[in-house]
Amino acid sequence: MASITAGTALALASTAITTGVAAMGAQAQAANRKAAANYQAAVAEQNQRLAQDAAKEERRAGYEAMLKERQKTALAIGRQRAAQGASGTAVDFGSNLEANAALAEQGEADALAQYQKGLDAAWNHEIQAWNQGRNAEAKRAAASAYSGAAGRTLVGGLTRIGTQFGLAGLKDPSGRNGYPTISL
């Protein structure tokens, strides 16, 4: 087996230095990407909290709109009953009772529609919050995946060094490597 020449030693050293520099660069790049992914995850988590707060507010607003609509209906029924009583008719019998019941029914339907509107808006915000939560999880997973980038670069460089070292030791006296040549 032939000894390693100065040119081969220089090539091995050059590959080692290149590998070290590449590993440091990969480490810096991975750290930057990890920091960016963690920042994006924090933003997504904040957006999730904001969407949850908006859903809570929409539910509250829908409930308050329902109560306001019921108060409005109660006021309208009270006015209608007062007018019926002022005209001298019985308010709890016949067509007056039916008119009051119809007004109450329509008012309750309107009140429930306001409440449902708030629940629908809240549901949309809850979906948005869920999506933001999954986005944050994905960003956190991406951040943890960047941790091994320098190690992968270092292993690749060491593989190249090992290959060069192995090939340097397999040279025969004619200068060709010891691997058979395949001709097609």
Image (tube, rainbow, N blue to C red):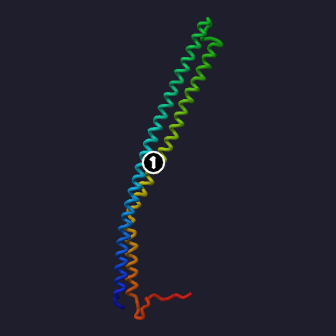
Residue 44 position, x and y percent, is 44, 48
What residue lies at 52% left-to-right and 35% top-to-bottom? 119
| 177 or 32, nearer to the observer | 32
Residue 153 drawn above or below residue 65: below
**Front in this rendered view, residue 92 or 50:** 50
Please state, as top left, top right, bottom left or bottom right, where the N terminus lies in the image: bottom left
Residue lying farthest to the right in this orientation: 95
Q: Is residue 146 above or below residue 113?
A: below
Q: How many marks?
A: 1
81 vs 8, left or right, is right
Q: Residues within 10 Å of mark 1 (few under 14, many from 20)?
A: some
Which residue, given by chain and number where applicable, does mark 1 sit on? 133
Q: Nearer the viewer, residue 32 or 100?
A: 32
Q: Position of residue 31 (x, y in %)?
A: 37, 60
Vertically, is 15 above or below 115?
Answer: below
What residue is rendered at 39% in x and 76% in y?
159
Quarter where residue 84 is shown: top right
Q: Inspect the image, locate mark 1, and give the three-letter code of the amino acid beneath it.
A: Gly
Horizontal relation, residue 182 to residue 162: left or right = right
Residue at image point 52% right, 87% down: 182
Where's residue 48, x and y in %? Answer: 44, 44
Label 1's element? helix
Where residue 120 sits, quadrant-wise, is top right
**Position of 14 compared to 126: left or right?**
left
Of all residues, the one furthest to the bottom in this rendering is 174
Q: Quadrant of the C terminus?
A: bottom right
State the residue at coordinates (49%, 41%): 126
Q: Position of residue 110 (x, y in %)?
A: 58, 26
